[in-house]
Image: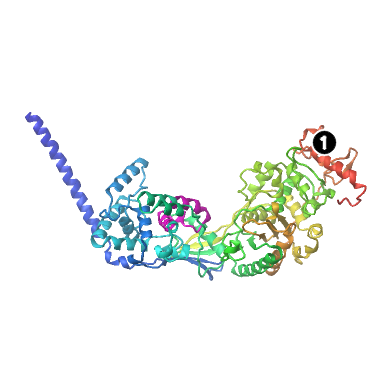
Amino acid sequence: MLLIKRLIFNILLIIGFFSFIFFSLLFIISAYLIYQLPPLEVINNPTNLGGTRIYDRSGNIILYEIGLRRYPVKYEEIPQKIILATLAAEDDSFFTHKGISLKGIIRSIILNLKERKLNYGGSTITQQLAKNLFLTNEKSLIRKLKEIFLALELERKFSKEKILELYLNSINYGGGNIGIKAAADFYFNKNLTELNWSEVAILSSIPKSPRNYTPIYEENIKRLKERRNLILKRLLNLGWISKDEYFLAINKEISISQKKYSKISAPHFVLKVRKILENMYPNLDLETAGLKVITTLNYQYQKIAEEIIKEKAKENEIKYKAKNASLLMMDTKTGEILVMVGSRDFFDNSIQGQVNMTTWPRQPGSVFKPISYITLFQLGYPIETIIFDTPTNFGTFNNPYKPNNFDKKFKGPINLKQALAESRNIPAVKVFYLTNPERIIENAKKFGITSIKDYKNYGLSLALGTAEISMIEMVKAYSVFANDGELISQSLILKILNDKNEVIYEYKPKKERVIDYQSVRMLNLILKDFEARRGLFQNSIKFTKIDDYDIAIKTGTSQFYRDAWTFGYSPNFVIAVWAGNTDGKRIPEGLSIVLTLPIWHEFTSKIIKDYPKTRFLNPIPYKVNKPMLNGEWFSDYGIHDILFYVDKNNPLGPIPKNPYLDPQFLNWEEGVNWWLQRSEYFPENEF
């Protein structure tokens, strides 16, 4: 018994000793941390750190400064709705705890141990205020202890109302808005008293992660709606709103922020640059980072483009009900984006002006066709190759696919040069099929187009550009044509300097050959040919020519006439123009050339004087001794479409022994027979 008592005594002695050591260390560490804490007297004098300045390529013109907006407000001026929504979102026991929540701390410890990471903090509003005002976002035990001590001191020194006032005036609501009043003004153009339950729940959602919840970006809207609804549900469960208020708020739609930017130039370009910066530096607060960003934007060209877009788009609206237009220019030698006009007017909500149509996916229509043709040339088909332009059902009897040409006419046998220069649809679908869709999609990816996820969803209609692709992707692809087969990297930023004026990023163009130069030169030979495109452009042909310069042109219209395009390029640049309606409303049929080509020509004519008169290189001439590929459509075998003579898996090989094995053969032959029955009555082969 005595031995047991002595053992217990020794154990208690050891426990006491280590407890004394532990609490002594804890006391010393706590005393040291408390000694290091900043004085709370500075709490009402927050420091405004330097923002991020975005410049044009000269480094002299400020396009925009990402800074902070602060509109302090007293607690008495803050509506009860905002207070309740904030508490429901962040800390519903705020008015009962003493600055820290033991329940929250224990929960965070368990979760952190479970994930073996410091992802959870269990912070109260008081702790968040302490961190926002005095500490960094570093995830460490020391920082957490400092936060707790500061929170306890804040609770000792200030009332709950004052702490909540300080919190609502100091937290980040995204978009450069610090504090609730600045956020309400920026996102809703409202005073605090005018906000409804949906709006206060939206604002209360943002501080958790401004990057993911601010409604500046379209992609955040879904996440923001889910978090808003979660907060509204929490308010209902706490009994702070009624069921009627809950259902009214939860059924309200969330629209993109009005983004009341002031003193901003080239807004679509600036917002794209900002998004790039956020992706480059995900843990950096741009509003306090002190960065200097030198962009690729040519401010002079940008202003010229904006004026032309505004004037011509207004004319298009009056004449053709096409309200909007956009323009993008890229230097093909460096990949630098020189001009980005995303809409006719960024601030015009009636045309959804804040949607950047240079980055928004739309159907490219016929401007996609060159990718099919260049892939066909890659397989060895000469430019002289004959394709029959005749009515053709590319589908089945029960599931037909019968595209038409823009002029509703069919020209019979034509060569590839005429087919592409005049942008005829039937030959384009045949080229797409002959080349094999897999090859074309592979080339599209090599050329920088990554948005086509599954071509099989489109079938042969993809030949006519039915897959949605952004203008900026298509411009990159066209730069391959301008660069003689080399893909150039693409950038909106030249250089980034930190707050010490040190260069932390500098753009270095990268080139990669992605296709042989012969195929590219064959394509350029067609698209630069002024006379070859006369049949397509007719009265607008003058807009496709700039004297003394080699210019390649391709226009297009999307399915159902929703988008009109012009892509023009020289060896030095690519310039693309879009016109239509942002909401997808149709434009009049057959007007793509009228809508976009004059815009393209006027802008290009004004800036091209700054570039040398560089010429496209010509392809090496070559012939293929095979019917249709040699430019002859009549042979000893009679008159047939190309599938009679070509195995699409071996186009330069022998004539197929049994062309009927190709599933498209009979469909194409039927079109040829249609033409033969009518050609004697229409010698010019146009019907």
Point 54% across, 70% down: residue: 61
Residue positioned most to the top? 1
Point 11% across, 33% down: residue: 7
Relative side of 667 to 574, left or right? right
For the residue pair 265 and 157, the one nearer the viewer reads as 157
| Residue 99 image position (x, y, % from top left) | 27, 55
Magenta region, residue range: 200-228
Asked if residue 517 is among those painted magenta in the image, a careful observer would answer: no
Question: Is 578 drawn above or below residue 395 in the view shown?
Answer: below
| Residue 242 image position (x, y, % from top left) | 39, 53
Would you name the residue on which mark 1 appears? 655
* Secondary structure that dominates the magenta span: helix
Q: Is residue 36 visible?
A: no
Point 33% across, 42% down: residue: 113
Q: For the residue marked with disc 1, what is the amino acid? A: Ile
Residue positioned most to the right? 680
Question: Is 285 drawn above or below residue 402 in the view shown?
Answer: below
Relative side of 211 to 433, left or right? left
Question: Is 130 drawn above or below residue 14 in the view shown?
Answer: below
| Residue 124 image position (x, y, % from top left) | 31, 53
Asked if residue 226 is among those painted magenta in the image, a careful observer would answer: yes
Residue positioned most to the front? 244
Residue positioned most to the left? 2
For the residue pair 10 and 519, the one nearer the viewer reads as 10
Relative side of 16 to 94, left or right? left
Look at the numbered disc 1 and give the secondary structure of its residue: loop
Relative side of 261 to 116, left or right? right
Point 35% across, 55% down: residue: 87
For the residue pair 46 and 169, the one nearer the viewer reads as 169
For the residue pair 420 and 509, the one nearer the viewer reads as 420
| Residue 630 image position (x, y, % from top left) | 84, 45
